[in-house]
Image (cartoon, grey):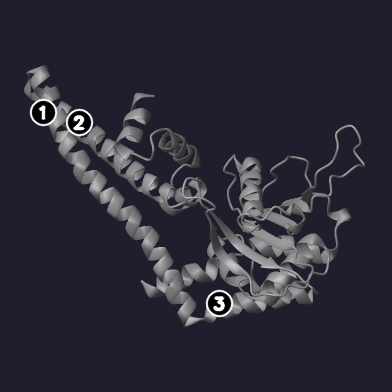
Amino acid sequence: MMENVVTKLERLNLVDRFLFDETMEDKDAYQAAVSILLENETELINKPETEKELRVSPQLRQIRLDVVSMDREKRIYYTEMQKRDTGNLKKRSRYYQAQLDVSLLEPGNKDFDLLNDSCLILIAPFDLFGYGLYRYTFEGTCRECPDLKIEDGAVRVFINTKGKNAQAFSQEFLDFMGYITASTDGMADKTNSAKIKRIHDRVKKIRRSEKMGVKYMQFWEEKAYAREEGLAEGREEGLKQGIKEGRKEGRKEGRKEGRKEGHREGVKEGLEAGERRKLIQLACRMLQKGNAPEVIADDFEENIDYIRKIYEAAEECAYDSDKVYAKLASE
């Protein structure tokens, strides 16, 4: 088991959340990454926080950020690695920005000028906007006067590692785009960037670390165990339901062949229904804890569209998994 997990760890790239978070927990590595992505030298003053959880109210949905840190001008950098297009990243970035802003002021503080400037960076191996750009930077501008910016200190940056406008960027930036999706010795050796080599040194240290191997093993086992436990319980529940349905169908047909066929079909449908019910139960539990739908889809290797349906139904049904199951079954 351990050898298998170590092999998996060796194959991870920065685009994988586990390796990204562990790498960027190092201040020098995160500082190098932000400087390259924004093409602006950035000096961070504190150790980055990884998997930072924010919930400004018990009634509001919790968010979990990959990496957070601050520079000398007290500007906050929030960076997210997003491997898959979940279809909601634009509005998700808006929600994250709102939650982050609320968390920056102490309760009762009325001086909004105390809000830190902030930069939300989302990195993805796909083009969210379809214009073929490596980087999309959004700041508040006036529709009537495009040159007029609101200058509220909030910036959202979307990085597309598969961009096509190479002429607009430095070689260091372009090398980093390749390194994010293929974090290998070969990619690091080909670049002249000291920043990328510094990041790769951190990646190599993580891959060699026995402690990190154990941490990844626990991370991997928890995902596998949760999935297998859910499927096993689902199969057991489905089997009971299937046998019951099969007998009912068999009696209805009143023939031996009908009983046999009805039993087979009932068991099959029951197994599928049981697995769906257990998946919904586990997903509702994880959603209540603040896990994003894309995280749940990754953990259970399920279709993101189906997990998103569960999420929407869960919000309507107050996370009651039985009601969610009934709602989805009726659609």
Camera-side residue: 189 or 200? 200
Quadrant in the rendering for residue 44: bottom right
- Disc 2 residue type (three-letter): Gly
Q: Regarding mark 3 in the picture, which secondary structure is present there?
A: helix
User: N-terminal of the two: label 3 or label 1?
Assistant: 3
**Residue bearing the label numbered 1:** 247
Quadrant in the rendering for residue 313: top left
Residues tagged 3 and 1 counted as in contact (Cβ below 8 A)? no
**Residue bearing the label numbered 3:** 206
- Disc 1 residue type (three-letter): Arg
Residue at (88, 54) in percent of width and height: 167
Instruction: Tell me if 22 is positioned left or right of 158 in this view.
Output: left
Instruction: Tell me if 292 is positioned left or right of 255 in this view.
Output: right
Q: Regarding mark 1 in the picture, which secondary structure is present there?
A: helix
Residues tagged 2 and 3 counted as in contact (Cβ below 8 A)? no
Q: Position of residue 135 (x, y in %)?
A: 78, 51
- Above-or-below relation of 213 to 151: below
Residues tagged 1 and 2 counted as in contact (Cβ below 8 A)? yes
Q: Position of residue 65 (x, y in %)?
A: 58, 58
Quadrant in the rendering for residue 38: bottom right
- Disc 3 residue type (three-letter): Ile
**Residue bearing the label numbered 2:** 266
Q: Regarding mark 2 in the picture, which secondary structure is present there?
A: helix
- Residue at mark 3 to residue at mark 1: CA–CA distance: 56 Å
Judged by depth in the image, the label closer to the viewer, 2 or 3, is 3
